[in-house]
Amino acid sequence: MAGATARRNDAARGLTYAAAESSARGGMQGAVVSSAEPAPGIAAAADASAYGWRTAAVVAAITAVRLLWLAWQPVGLYPDEAQYWFWAQHPAFGYYSKPPLVAWLIWLTTTAFGDGEFAVRLAAPLLHALAAGFVYVIAAWLYDRRTGFWSALAYASLPGVSLSAFIISTDAVLLPCWAAALYAFIRAREAGSRPLWWAAVGIAAGLGLLAKYAMAYWLLSALGFLLLFRDERQHLKPFLAAAGIALLIYLPNLWWNWSNGFVSYLHVRDNAELSGNLLHPAAFLEFFASQFGVIGPLFFAALLAIVARPRLFAESRARLLAAFALPTLVMMLGVSLLSRAQPNWAAPTYVSAIVLVVAYLLQHGWRRLLPASIALNLAAAVLLFGATDALATAGIAIPARYDPLHRLRGWRELGQQVSALLAAHPGLTLLADDRELLAALIYYVRPHPMGAVEWNPIPGITDQWRLVNNIGNHRGEDFLAVTMNGLLDLMQPDFTELAPIAAIATTTGHGGGRVYTVYIARGFKGDGRQRR
């Protein structure tokens, strides 16, 4: 009975979309996704309801493996993770470079499970499991539960998701919000839907803005979709009300930025580096190639094949999914051409893009590519995170430059040695000449030196440390200065005495490492705010 009910529900939704499609096309009845496309919404499996349980079981298994790996793996925190942990010790409505939700989640997990690396990262795999669940219901509602199953598995296997599930970041917090907002948006647009779905759109979008400012792309995509297609314009008013809810939820961070000179927005502007020389074709090609790694080579190739056939977007579901994928991807490609773009900046694209790709492959008889792509992506993740340490256990050393995790190694060792130096020189405040170095030291030095400061020759406020504990407020004080940038000539005028006491060498793998010079810096007389 349950399976039959599920099949009838899927069929009813498919007929609803088919009817809407026929009405929207008018004289374009020939422009369909595939000449062999099955009736939308009809379950391909004998028992549609089984796909829900299978999805939950497989996503749970992948998440469990990721949690076990987080508990077992030996590498330390990435400096940005250590910085977010520091933010979590000082809950606020905003921080220099990011909105606050990632810090709030780390506060929750570390309050419950302690300050170890596992607890700092704990939310990341759980958030991606939640996002996979929303991907499932998006695909199942638009198509059928078989499409939902493969879409959720495909999302969970993406190389970018595997990396983001291992390192706590704002992307891990953003993506479930993006997916939840999209699902609520799909439900809210249906005839007879309850107003609560529009409220859910606003809540998810508001939380997304508190996770990462890139959630604004979602709001712009939704607005563009509603304006571009005439039949969708009837939803403009409730969408604007939902956007108002999102803005209300986001207001605390807006207020924080207002109180701090809008430093976060200025950072986002500066991070894009659009004021320099225009046109960087090499950066464009590098970003474009990186997307094969973010979503996986076969899935990205399939997405390109879809984009190369615009007639596919005559179908309403494809148009909807593309509206929340392609604008962000195209914008990031443009940014990479004009300046530079990090591979993860297009990550929200793949929430809807993966559903579009999976539906395309299933409808065109390419189902076998799905398990092959998923297996390839998961194998790449295993190699990325496990190969170096597994081979080291077998006595085979991989050169550090070929170790994808080499930037996460060596911080614990550095923290232990700096801890000993601070204990041997009581009364000194920890200082570092680099933001990432300072973040790692605050996390790995014991006891945690929460009052540590950053010395930086670049004028102005450039990060959270200089915003909330500027060295300019410590004139006349003495420091234990850990340096990595070799800027002694620039540091000396800012102190009455600068005496080297140690050199610390750390290893980041076979043949790799870093060297730090440690000074006792007495009598700070500089100004951490003014331009030089």
Image (cartoon, helix red, strand yellow):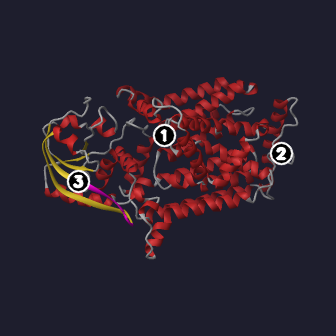
Q: CA distance from mark 3 to mark 1?
A: 37 Å
442 horizontally vs 270: left or right = left
* Quarter holding residue 512: bottom left
**Mark drawn on residue 517:** 3
Q: Earlier in the sequence, mark 3 or mark 1?
A: 1
Determine the residue positioned at 80% across, 38% down: 16
Badge 1 density bin: few <14, some 14–19, many ≥20, Cα 10 Å: many
The amino acid pointed to by label 3 is Thr
Above or below, 464 against 389 in this view is above
**Highlighted magenta segment, given as a residue range:** 510-517
Q: Position of residue 485 (x, y in %)?
A: 29, 48
Q: Main secondary structure of the magenta part?
A: strand
Query: Which residue in the protein does label 1 denote?
Result: 211
Query: Which residue in the protein does label 2 denote?
Result: 34
The amino acid pointed to by label 1 is Ala
* Quarter holding residue 219: top right
Q: Position of residue 204 (x, y in %)?
A: 56, 37
Determine the residue positioned at 79% across, 35% down: 314
